[in-house]
Amino acid sequence: MDRLIDKAAEDIAAARSVTALTGAGVSIESGIPPFRGKGGLWEKIDPMEYAHIDAFRRDPEKVWQVLIKSMADVLGSARPNDAHFGLVRLEKMGKLKTVITQNVDGLHQAAGNTDVIEFHGSFARQCCTDCGKQCQSSEVNMDAIPPRCQCGGIYRPDCVFFGEMIPPDALLRSRAAAASCDVMLVMGTSAMVQPAAHMPVLARENGARIIEINPESTPLTGSVSDCFIPGSGGRIMNAILARLERLCGPVHE
Ligand code: OAD
């Protein structure tokens, strides 16, 4: 394990530009359950019944009651953990340029990262399905479900449902960040959902080293990833940063 941490720190120290790709695993230590695996959301509810855009169009009230409201409740009280703060320290060292996240919880921004691409959108914003008006989720009156805009249209979270396209700007910027980095840090994602899981492939095709942090192996492990470090995001980030600070000097907060 020490050898893996040393190698990851050396790769990051030598890199001019690091991009991170994150998934639900980085927010587990903040109390937000993942989608897949033990205790995952898709173990409790069928994503095709509750997280597909056709399901929302068919019965928005049902999707609001079961999926959106319960997610909003969990996300509302969550705070960043050491995995998020580790990425902020990497940015302050001048190494990390961009975080591509599949998470809709806003915790990378809350921790302090400045360039965060929300690949699957955000739960922090709502959008009216009729007039297109956008607002902060905190401004939406949830007394009646589904909540409605002043125009009478139903609100939806500004996130990507299954069956929808990735916002073009997020996709283009992510591809550019993947293609231009020397190191990609892939943390807390099962790499099961495309096109997000293609970003490390793109990075590697363009010469980047791929460092993967996850307690479990994924389809990237041993093929796309150059270095797989088993363990939780917070603990491994702390270990890499301690080693990196010995190589590059301390981070100035
Ligand atoms: P998943 O729930 O598929 O995977 C979470 C990953 O986190 C797994 O590989 C776990 O092994 C890993 N993990 C668990 N604990 C961890 C820890 N403490 N530190 C680091 N990693 C840990 O989540 P995503 O890969 O993000 O899409 O899922 C991708 C997309 O599938 C989501 O964005 C969502 C979902 O359907 C949409 O909603 C469009």
Image (cartoon, helix red, strand yellow):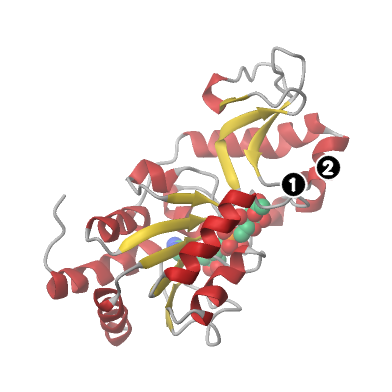
Indicate the quadrant where residue 198 lies: bottom right
Distance from mark 1 CB to nearest ligand 1 atom below 8 Å: yes
Q: Position of residue 143 (x, y in %)?
A: 65, 16
The residue positioned 77% from the left and 20% from the top of the image is 153
Label 1's element? loop
Vertical placement of 146 versus 167: above or below?
Answer: above
Picture quadrant of ligand 1: bottom right
Label 2's element? helix
Q: Is residue 38 visible?
A: no
Whether residue 105 sits left or right of residue 165 in the image: it is left
Residue underneath mark 2: 55
The residue positioned 62% from the left and 30% from the top of the image is 126
Image marks 2 and 1: residues in contact by CB distance under 8 Å: yes
Q: Position of residue 43 (x, y in %)?
A: 70, 57
Q: Amino acid at mark 1?
A: Ala
Vertical placement of 156 versus 109: above or below?
Answer: above
State the residue lying farthest toward the right.
58
The residue positioned 43% from the left and 45% from the top of the image is 107
Residue underneath mark 1: 51
State the residue lying farthest toward the top.
150
